[in-house]
Image (tube, helix red, strand yellow):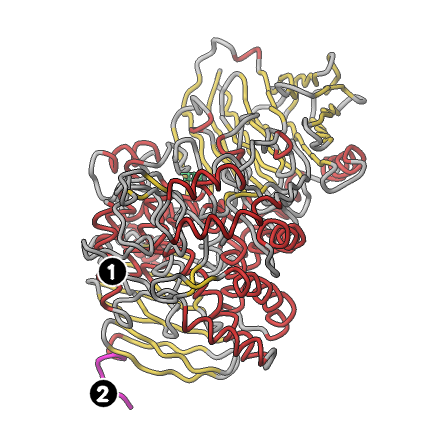
């Protein structure tokens, strides 16, 4: 008894301190979702659902990552290659309007429906006719991030009903389990629908099949739903399944398309049949066993969680009204990790603009891979937030894009190497859609840098040699041909290009988009050449090529500080047409690039700060998320926190999805990366501990963040001061640890770990 009391007392202390494991990371609500933006997402990387939790008519809006309309197509556009010298000449001569007119005629081409859209898979409806008009009480709907399980509970007519939904990666199916605390109380009709291009049929007593296709080439796909009832019975009623008087019901849903399988129906049937034959507890346990090791790699506490029992929508409303809620920020961080695990598993397509969750046949921006910022942002958290293997779908897409990128480099630019423009569908098209203003030539280079960063976080010579270096080198080859000398200084510049997606006021008063050598392009080239040089040196490869890179690197147009003290967005000190534009492309060099830092380049850092001040704190969700990262890199934790607060207050939906609007997942991922960036940075060759800790988070702890060099780091702090850090190394290595102005070096054996205490940085160096 005594022992129990002590344990209870300890638990209470822990709860008060907000440190308790008793506050699981859960999004919870006391009413069904009124719309899609309130529903809760589950996903196994490929197959996903938005769960509404409606009492009388449950609704799951279903997605599968390959349900795209459209098909591979490629337009060579040799007229672009022919016009390039003239467009450049006009731009160098300052005739922006004429350059633009020629570019518009030769670079842009109309939208082609074969580009396609990412489309919904289907809708699953479960009708409970007997419960219509019967009041439901004790309603709770939640998403448990610790187990990746959505649950809806309520009582009705004296019976407690529970609905559990999860998407299992090992079983490749979505599972819905309906239970009641009294036998024989589950009677419902189960139905699959799709707004277009589909046929639904029942097959045998417990199975319905929806088959369909998407237009403009597209895919053929199949969704198979199997129902098994414990007690009671299941029968077919038209194209629906009718469950009567069951104690419990398990629904298993599989879906496949011709993007992966020639006979998607056969595979989906097999997957559904295999899973429905398994005891439900085993399906659930296998799902949690698969998911949890990924999720649990990182823990984050930002202090007490006094609002843990308050509904998530209510919490968010309080933040909108100005309240601080550090624990909600921690939940939001973990929600971002949850979303990446749920939308980007190694065998899936990369997370698109909406991850995998989309209920529109014509979603905004095709719900595609927009590669002038958005897709890259999706993958920012993967390395620091310890989910590195989830980059695999992105790397697979990069591989797939290389041939078309090569062809485009030759046909459109007359260059070696490979190039990608603003967006791509999974068919690996390199699009130059709509208007020439959107011309961006640096997407391939930027994506290549993701491979490089993956290597930096987990140095592995074989990965570098086989998967990173060839891609970096091919990107660099493009610029060796593409760069030209500008007439004023002889600097090498890339272009023509826009600075996504801003416009400038040209000296003649007109507004322009295309210039030679916009700052972002120059920064990407500098980052790329530097990475390629270091990679080549590490591998001892391509000596003459490296010499060439080094020579070109030295001649690249530098970053310049403009009349407002800002970092110039263009080679000339132009005024922006929209000074508060959501894109802050020219701060690529600050983040994710490594060219601007308060310590190493203080003047440029001050200019970057000025740029951010002039740009303001507004913008869409992803814009605010990028600004968290920018301010963290400027080591201004309070401003980074202000951006996070405003992201939550202004750009976050009730289900914690980021709101562009519409929902766009990059803001979630960018914010998760930003929070990691506030707590640990490693891009300048040191492990910088708590580089941008805001005053709003005086006490907290984090475990499992990763740092470049192959390190994993746990940190604890109180009163805004580091109290303890544990660093684990994968290889025999040395790490320079930085806290504020102080640094200390630690040596590690392979697999070694060291813990330091508060006085580590203040005690005299040994
Ligand atoms: C770019 C951005 C938009 C949006 C879209 C997907 O065009 O400017 O804000 O993020 O991509």
Task: Compare residues 79 and 122 and report the one nearer the observer.
Answer: 79
Q: Which residue is mark 1?
A: 561
- Which quadrant would residue 194 be assigned to in this image? top right
Q: Which mark is residue 258?
A: none
Residue ID at (49%, 52%)? 379
Residue 722, image x and y in percent?
Answer: 26, 68
Position of the N terminus, as image quadrant, is: bottom left
Task: Compare residues 721 and 228 and report the one nearer the observer.
Answer: 721
* Position of residue 69 in the picture relative to residue 8 (left or right): right
Position of the C terminus, as image quadrant, is: bottom left
Residue ID at (75%, 17%)? 235
Residue 15, image x and y in percent?
Answer: 30, 50
Residue 509, image x and y in percent?
Answer: 26, 39
Q: Quadrant of ligand 1?
A: top left
Give whichever of discs 2 and 1 has the lower sequence position. 1
Answer whether residue 227 is visible to the viewer in this image.
no
Residue ID at (43%, 34%)? 663
Task: Compare residues 492 and 759 and report the one nearer the observer.
Answer: 492
Queried whether the magenta region covers residue 154, the answer comes back as no
Does the beta carbon at disc 1 come under 8 Å from ligand 1?
no
Q: Mark 2, mark 1: which one is toward the viewer? A: 1
* Position of residue 112 in the picture relative to residue 619 (left or right): right
Magenta-highlighted residues: 760-766
For mark 1, give the secondary structure.
Answer: loop
Q: Residue furthest top?
A: 133
Q: Which residue is mark 2?
A: 764
């Amino acid at each position: 008894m005594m022992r129990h009391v002590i344990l209870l007392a300890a638990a209470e202390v822990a709860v008060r301190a907000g440190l308790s494991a008793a506050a699981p990371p859960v999004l919870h609500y006391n009413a069904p979702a009124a719309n899609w933006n309130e529903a809760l997402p589950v996903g196994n990387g490929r197959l996903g659902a938005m769960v509404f939790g409606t009492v009388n008519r449950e609704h799951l809006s279903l997605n599968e990552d390959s349900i795209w309309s459209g098909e591979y197509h490629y337009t060579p556009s040799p007229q672009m290659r022919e016009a390039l010298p003239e467009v450049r000449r006009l731009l160098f001569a300052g005739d922006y309007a004429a350059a633009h007119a020629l570019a518009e005629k030769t670079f842009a081409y109309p939208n082609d429906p074969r580009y396609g859209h990412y489309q919904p898979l289907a809708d699953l409806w479960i009708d409970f006719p007997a419960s219509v008009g019967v009041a439901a009480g004790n309603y709770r709907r939640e998403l448990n991030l610790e187990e990746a399980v959505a649950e809806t509970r309520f009582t009705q007519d004296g019976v407690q009903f529970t609905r559990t939904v999860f998407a299992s990666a090992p079983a490749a199916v979505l599972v819905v389990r309906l239970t009641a605390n009294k036998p024989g109380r589950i009677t419902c009709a189960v139905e699959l629908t799709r707004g277009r291009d589909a046929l639904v049929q029942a097959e045998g007593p417990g199975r319905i099949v929806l088959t369909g296709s998407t237009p403009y080439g597209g895919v053929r796909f199949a969704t198979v739903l199997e129902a098994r009832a414990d007690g009671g019975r299941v029968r077919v009623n038209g194209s629906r399944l009718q469950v009567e008087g069951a104690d419990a019901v398990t629904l298993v849903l599989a879906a496949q398309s011709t993007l992966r399988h020639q006979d998607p129906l056969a595979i989906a049937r097999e997957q559904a049949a295999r899973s429905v034959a398994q005891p439900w507890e085993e399906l659930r346990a296998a799902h949690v066993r698969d998911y949890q090791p990924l999720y649990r790699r990182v823990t984050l506490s930002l202090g007490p969680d006094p609002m843990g029992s308050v509904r998530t929508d209510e919490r968010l409303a309080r933040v909108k009204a100005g309240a601080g809620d550090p624990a909600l920020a921690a939940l939001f961080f973990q929600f971002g990790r949850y979303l990446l695990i749920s939308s980007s598993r190694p065998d899936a397509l990369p997370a698109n603009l909406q991850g995998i969750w989309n209920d529109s046949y014509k979603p905004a921006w095709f719900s595609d891979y927009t590669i002038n910022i958005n897709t890259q942002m999706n993958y920012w958290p993967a390395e620091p937030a310890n989910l590195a293997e989830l980059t695999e779908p992105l790397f697979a897409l990069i591989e797939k894009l290389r041939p078309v990128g090569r062809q485009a480099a030759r046909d459109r630019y007359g260059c070696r190497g490979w190039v990608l423009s603003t967006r791509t569908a999974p068919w690996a098209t390199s699009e130059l859609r709509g208007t020439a203003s959107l011309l961006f030539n640096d997407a391939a280079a930027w994506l290549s840098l993701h491979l490089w960063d993956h290597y930096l976080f987990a140095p592995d010579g074989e990965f570098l040699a086989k998967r990173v270096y060839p891609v970096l080198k091919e990107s660099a080859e493009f610029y060796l041909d593409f760069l030209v000398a500008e007439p004023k200084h002889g600097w090498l510049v890339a272009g023509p290009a826009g600075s996504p997606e801003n416009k400038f006021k040209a000296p003649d008063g007109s507004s322009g988009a295309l210039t030679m050598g916009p700052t972002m392009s120059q920064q990407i080239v500098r980052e790329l050449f530097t990475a390629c040089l270091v990679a080549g040196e590490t591998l001892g490869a391509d000596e003459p090529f490296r010499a060439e890179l080094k020579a070109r690197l030295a001649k690249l147009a530098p970053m310049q500080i403009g009349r407002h003290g800002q970092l110039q967005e263009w080679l000339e000190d132009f005024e922006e047409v929209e000074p508060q534009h959501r894109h802050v492309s020219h701060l690529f060099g600050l983040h994710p690039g490594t060219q601007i830092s308060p310590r190493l380049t203080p003047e440029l850092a001050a200019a970057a700060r000025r740029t951010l001040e002039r740009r303001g704190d507004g913008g869409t969700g992803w814009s605010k998320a990028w600004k968290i990262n920018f301010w963290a890199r400027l080591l201004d934790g309070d401003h980074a926190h202000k951006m996070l607060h405003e992201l939550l207050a202004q750009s976050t939906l009730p289900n914690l999805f980021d709101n562009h609007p519409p929902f766009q997942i990059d803001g979630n991922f960018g914010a998760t990366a930003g929070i990691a960036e506030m707590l640990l940075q490693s891009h300048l060759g040191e492990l910088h501990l708590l580089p941008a800790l805001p005053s709003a988070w005086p006490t907290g702890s984090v475990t499992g963040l990763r740092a470049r060099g192959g390190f994993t780091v746990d940190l604890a702090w109180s009163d805004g001061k580091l109290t303890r850090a544990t660093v684990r190394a994968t290889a025999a290595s040395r790490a320079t640890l930085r806290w504020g102005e102080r640094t200390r070096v630690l040596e590690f054996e392979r697999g070694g770990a060291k813990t330091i205490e508060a006085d580590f940085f203040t005690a005299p160096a040994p």
